[in-house]
Image: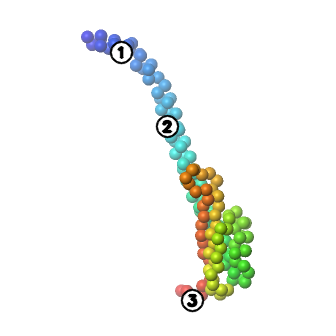
Amino acid sequence: MIVRDLRQYGPVGSVVRSERGVAGVLAVATVMVLVSVAAIGVLGMTYAAAARSVRAAADLVAVSGAQANAQGTDACDEAARMAARNQVELSGCEVAGDLIDHVVEVTVRRPVGWRLPGLPDRVSATAYAGSVSGVP
């Protein structure tokens, strides 16, 4: 009876033949998941690198604007010139104070190379620089 029950499932090798190629499909699916995770990681690193470089450029632009203001020239013109040299867009510049005590606030932004839908296409940073006397 046991033999008869096994015969209803076909020849002994038929089960193995019906599962042929499953490992290939599983390997392709695994590679696709790994490639997707790697692509998302690269996008994350792209945003992180762009944000870091924009913060550094904002600091540089703010310091150059503060230095120009201390020398009596227009801080925002110098900030715009420095922003162009650092390949960022100056989206805001404000000077508070006088030649002695002053603070320059700048906002710069730069487009991100690769982006996903739903994520911003630009990163921005704000920096402050200046000279304030009487502050410990």
Residue 62 visible, this orientation: no
**What percent of the width, then of the height, locates residue 10?**
38, 13
Q: Is residue 52 left or right of residue 5?
A: right
Q: Quadrant of residue 1?
A: top left
Q: Are marks 3 and 1 in contact (CB under 8 Å)?
A: no
Residue with the mark numbered 2? 30
Residue 126, visible in the rendered structure: yes
Q: Which residue is mark 1?
A: 9
Q: Earlier in the sequence, mark 3 or mark 1?
A: 1
Q: CA distance from mark 2 to mark 1?
A: 32 Å
Identified at 54% across, 48% down, the residue is 40
Residue 87 locus on image (x, y percent): 70, 63
Q: Name the one closer to the observer, 89 or 39.
A: 89
| Residue bearing mark 3 | 134
Relative image position of residue 36 (x, y in whole percent): 53, 43
> What residue do we see at 50% from left, 33% from top?
27
